[in-house]
Amino acid sequence: MIERGINFTMTTVGYADPVAHLTFPNATQSVMSPLVLDLQRYLPCLVGIICALGLLCNGFIILLLLTFSNMKTLANTFILNLALADFFFMVTFPFLGHQMYSGQWIFGRVMCKIVVPYDTMTQFTVVFFLVVMGFDRYLAICQPIRSMHYRTIRNGRIVSLLVWLTSFLVSLPVWIYTDQIAYKVDGGTTVNLCLALARTNDSDVNGFYWWIIYTIFFDFCAPLTIIFVCYFLIIWNLWHSPLQDIRNTSRRASRKVAVLVICIVFIFVCCYLPFFIVQVIQSKLEATDGLLIAYIISWFLMYSHSTINPVVYTMLGENFRQNLPRLCRTIFRRRKTATRQSSMRTSSMYLRRSRSSLKSSNSTDGMGRIHSNGYLSVGPKITVTAQPRRLPLEDPV
């Protein structure tokens, strides 16, 4: 818990400035508003809930796509990579949440140079795969004949690799300039902070306004424009299809697609737009309680998008709804089989130990012994000494 006025940091994609922006007010917690104190108190719990849900939902989707062979399609190839990006994006969430809660980075410089840039790269990856999936749906619905030759799983894997590479290149400034810096707080205490766009030998950071514009363009405006255009063309094509005059089922299907598209765009805007608005505002204004609360809420909204993605893009599909119970039954059966085998192994070990105890007791009671051939002889132990065979009468009794 923060006991002094430690300057707040924005360590995800965007602006990072611990000196002039987004600070916990002034000197002590006594000057903080009750709402800020409550939000700060429950911050670890909120981080844990969102992270657990994100890892669980995306983990189920990854396991589902890798288990069933009927799920191996081009669209599911992109969904698998989206789930992987969301999964890895949620992995970095606790590290940054701890820094936000405690006001310092305790995981070392090496982890700093890995976690924050990787968080940035996976965030770009998530958004880029949303664009790819929108364009793929446009080709599948509006250009089914022309696109059937190059809409293959092999090409989908190549496109997925290119998306990951593009995300790395776009986030390259963060990979280069992220660093752990020492920052002095009130009272002369020094704390370490992990910051994007940090100078290596300076306690300040490059709060470049260009980075705000850069991230807003590549991570929100351009992707949203492409997604909106693709889905608008899909809805236009479905509503003006000649099949509308032949079958009413096509109209109902188009309504379902329209609702799904509206949900996709609405959720994307609601989760990402507040974060970028707060970045622009905080770069121009002094920090206040309201701005701090707005940033924390927008930060959680951005990460919650990776928890909502599995529901929107996968759970609404018919194949996923059919295969998810099968996966649960398979996992339950495997656990039941493993429990049964473990019980059988325990019983077998107990039986072997019982037999060993019986052999040991029979060999030491003086009334019998077990030969190497497995037969039990009763009576006192007699030692027989071999002698030369001369006459039948000289055989030992």
Image: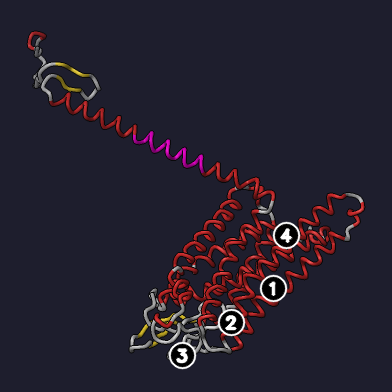
SS of the residue under disc 2? helix
Q: Amino acid at mark 3?
A: Asp
How far apart marks 3 and 2 lie (CA) works out to 18 Å
Callout in the foreground (1, 4) = 4
Q: Amino acid at mark 1?
A: Pro
Q: Main secondary structure of the magenta part?
A: helix
Magenta stretch, residue numbers: 332-346
Give the labeled residue for mark 1: 223
Quadrant of image for the N terminus: bottom left
Asked if residue 148 lies in the magenta stretch, the reply is no
Q: Earlier in the sequence, mark 1 or mark 3?
A: 3
SS of the residue under disc 1? helix
SS of the residue under disc 4? helix
Q: Earlier in the sequence, mark 1 or mark 4?
A: 1
How far apart marks 4 and 2 lie (CA) works out to 29 Å
Give the labeled residue for mark 4: 260
Quarter-of-image position of residue 258: bottom right
The answer to whether residue 330 is visible is yes
From the viewer's perspective, tell me whether residue 211 is left or right of residue 8.
right
Residue 183 position within the rendered picture, expressed as x and y whole percent measured from the top left: 40, 87
How far apart marks 4 and 3 lie (CA) works out to 45 Å
| Vertical relation: 196 (above or below) 270 | below
Q: Amino acid at mark 4?
A: Leu
